Amino acid sequence: MRTPQVVEYDLDFSTLGLPPGHEHVCLAAFVCTVDATDQIAATNTDLDTVTMTDKHVAHRNTHLVALGAEPLIRRGSGFITINFNNASDELGAYDLIFDRSNFPGRVALLLPKLADLSPTASALTGFRLASRDELLIDVERALGGWIERLGEFLERLGERIAGDPAPGAHLSPGAIEARRRRRHALELLDRAHVLIADAGTEPAVVSGVQIRPRDMVTGAFAIEAPPSAVRLDRYRLDVVQKRAGRILGGSSYVVAIV
């Protein structure tokens, strides 16, 4: 059994000897076991390629700002994609749980059409199903137009699949196929309806989601900081995947108010 956790590492960027004016740093993370049971299989050292094919590796670009800089609080996030996997050889029904006990803000979730996820219709607890028109009135401004940005991302991803992502760059067939699969998974999202969990600490759950053997369901969600949030506040949001009450996967997120 794997339990989602958040790992933190303190780093003083001033000790890296960066050239003057250098404001962007790439952070890479590698996760594997100390024995041979779950090692990184990739041999390619190009992070852009490896992160598309090996979930043991992730990287993010970080923008460095001057000490004491105080940007305005962003109440809403961009979209965050998440995969819910069925690693077994049998069709499985799963519960997708957003544990908000340490994050009382609002959550907006996109999934494929609920009717396609379960023949008996998935049950919602803590979520309400909102049409796109209701979203425009209710939370679109707070969440920063993230559905539009998701559509723009799909367009850019399609362009990268059709050609090189940058002059002189060449992707392996495996990386191109990984991008095709990701785009297909995101295109399955029902962008006409959104699951909304209003501010509060109660868990928000989608129950009975059926996932085919050795397959996955991809979702995308955005979060809105609690109304009482102030700069430097930190929260934790846990997304857990269960089957018959047993935790089979999940992700944890530290929400830092900047």
Image (tube, grey):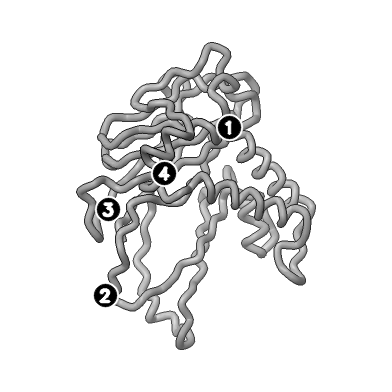
Q: Name the amino acid type tagged 1.
A: Val
Mark 1, residues whose alpha carbon is within 10 Å: few (<14), some, or many (≥20)? Answer: many
Q: Position of residue 157 (x, y in %)?
A: 67, 52
Counting residues from the start of the chain, the first of labels 1 and 2 encountered is 2
Q: Which residue is more in the foreground, 140 or 79? A: 140
Give the Cα separation between the discs numbered 1 and 2.
42 Å
Q: Is residue 190 above or below residue 44?
A: above
Mark 1–mark 2 contact, CB under 8 Å? no
Mark 2–mark 4 contact, CB under 8 Å? no
Residue at numbered disc 3: 234
Q: Residue drawn at (77%, 54%), measured in percent from left and top? A: 162
Q: Position of residue 171 (x, y in %)?
A: 75, 59
Residue at numbered disc 1: 217
Q: Nearer the viewer, mark 4 or mark 1?
A: 4
Q: Is residue 203 above or below residue 55?
A: above
Q: Nearer the viewer, mark 2 or mark 4?
A: 4
Q: Name the amino acid type tagged 4.
A: Glu
Counting residues from the start of the chain, the first of labels 4 and 1 encountered is 4
Residue at numbered disc 2: 68
